Amino acid sequence: MNGKIFKSSFISILDNTLRITWVVILVIITNITIIFKKLNEFNIGIKFNFLLLAILLLFLTVVIVYNYILWKATSFKVNNKTIEIYNNIFVKDKREFMLKNIANIGISQNIFERIFKLYRIRSYTNAKNKMFCDFEIILKKADYLSLLNKFKINALPSINAKRIKFNFIDILRSSILSIPISSIIIIVNFILLIYNMISSKTIIKETLYDFLGLIITLLGFVFPVIYSILKNVIKYIYYQIERHDENIILNFGLFTRKTYIIPIDKIKGIIIDVSLLSKIFRCYKINIINSGIGDNKNEIYMLFPISSKKLCQKILNEILPEYDINNNYKMQPRETFVILISQILVLLLILIIPCIYINMKLAMIISILLFVSIFFIYFIKRLIIEENNLCIINGFFIKRIKIIKYEDIKSVEIVDGPISKRYGICKLKVNLMEKFNIINNSTGYITRKDMYYIVGKIVNNNFNEI
Amino acid sequence: MYYNKLSENSAKYIFTIYLLLAILINLVIIALSIIVESMVELKYKLVFNLVLISVIIIIYIFSILKSTLLISNYSYIINDNKIESIRGAFIVKRDIMLLKNVYKIEINRRIISRIFKVADIKFISCGGTIKLKYIGYDKLNKIENIIQERMCNI
């Protein structure tokens, strides 16, 4: 089959070298005066600085040579149905995958690439635990457009295309809400401490007395949080999301402009995360289940910036109406209490009997805690069953809501215990192409009628009772 | 719908495996008891030996009971649409996977299983796996052919 052969631009050697060695180059540039000084001296005896610079230059040369060999040996051939990647450095290596399996294309341009009008393209095929992309190529604009054309991806907006832009305040709010709660506690404590010192007029005295402590607190706890917020603001500023007929396109970034093209049919579900901080400010973080999204720390981890609940629902309705759900969730059946109580009683027998001999109060506290946990476990799981989607809600204050299409569920596991069978309930675990850090997809206890409805939807009503 | 039960060969294989396991544990316990007796002077030797014998008996009874329950409660079905396996006596687990989602098949034949002409088949999709255990060679080829016809790439 004849196909078009693509090769990374020659400037990509320099670009890739810069990505690895920018620190080394910075060291060389800052030490340039020493280099000239050494050259002028014509000193025969090798000094430490000269040796260090020589090693750095050698490292730089090795990286350039390595990148040149890699560039020379790598090529991409795109056919009508497949893409072949040749990597013939020492061993003749050929990888091939179907174009229809491409789940996500990420295009990025850093400042250097923008100067030379280059496009860095990363592509992921749908698979579990996708930490690394399937291929990466740096192309000039004409080749880049030609490659997209070969992929049969129509990134041009149609009449029905919907576009939502986010302003600076949205991005800043999202960046602040992305901070872990532990960092927030430290920052609040630090601000309260400073306020206390200012109000008692002892700030100068205290600072002079424990200057080292202040520096350690600033460098160790405060600056990393500020850096994280600034980094996220710079990374996600000018965020824009577009819904086309077949794809979703995300654009963002100040220095490094990034674009993601995600085919709608390759989105395997939606995850809505509500952290404690988001819960306080009534905000949601929405992400999609798609290869490459959120798996690697360099890739995007959200569909759009963290926004208020109402705005999230509105955006989701416009961008992904396929995943629109109602709010009529089902709790676990009341019979679940019987199973939970029996499980807790077994635990009580194991824990309480030895505790009674040691301390009666301790035994009482443990038994009360265990019985309270029954209610907690009962209320933690909720379920929304719809015509096309299944929604699993996990958690109480910190929530994770997962919306999955029945057709995207790959396998199911039905668990029936002796008590649950008697009361007509069972547990259902659904498996789909997931992110590597998410394992539990259990619906909790559901009635057998609901189980038959869900499993029937998954296996196209080809499911029968034993 | 007809669910396949394990064949006679598979039942023999399961019995043998559990019996071998019980014998192995038995040997380890005996070896440990000999070492303990040679190193420490036991006060209640008779009680110690009685406890050991009862533990060994329990292990054998458990292995026979476990293998019997496994054989009687294991069933599977493969039709045009799906693979389904049911296992467990008290807690029953039922795995279902659509044939169109299978993208890889793994067949494991171990040393003892080859004697009894039994193999394990693992069906892998991009969202989980299903394992059909103790399948006889006569059915293995049939299952493999059905799956290969129906499966498609993800």
Image (spheres, grey):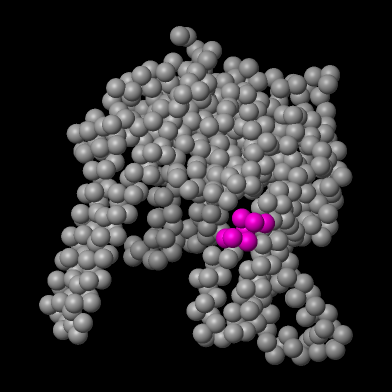
Give x and y (percent) for residue A49.
43, 64
Residue A114 vs residue A187, the one in the foreground:
A187
- Whether residue A433 is visible here, answered yes or no, is no
Residue displayed at 67% across by 56% down: A337
Is A394 rendered above or below residue A81? below
Q: Quadrant of residue A46?
A: bottom left
Give x and y (percent) for residue A200.
85, 89
| In-image side of A377 versus A354 (left or right) | right
Q: Residue furthest left?
A: B38
Is A423 rendered above or below residue A177? above
Residue displayed at 74% across by 48% down: A331
Which quadrant: the N terminus of chain A? top left
- Whether residue A159 is visible here, answered yes or no, is yes
| Callout count | 0
Question: Is B93 contained in the magenta span?
Answer: no
| In-image side of B74 versus A167 (left or right) | left
Main secondary-structure element of the magenta-colored stretch: helix
Residue A259 vs residue A366, the one in the foreground:
A366
Q: Which residues are magenta?
A: A337-343
Residue B42 vs residue A51, the one in the foreground:
B42
Give x and y (percent) for residue A271.
69, 43
Residue displayed at 66% across by 67% down: A371
Residue displayed at 79% across by 57% down: A279
Q: Quadrant of residue A146?
A: top right
| In-image side of B134 versus A215 (left or right) | left
Give x and y (percent) for residue A258.
68, 37
Question: Is A339 contained in the magenta span?
Answer: yes
Residue A89 vs residue A301, the one in the foreground:
A301
| In-image side of B75 versus A414 (left or right) | left
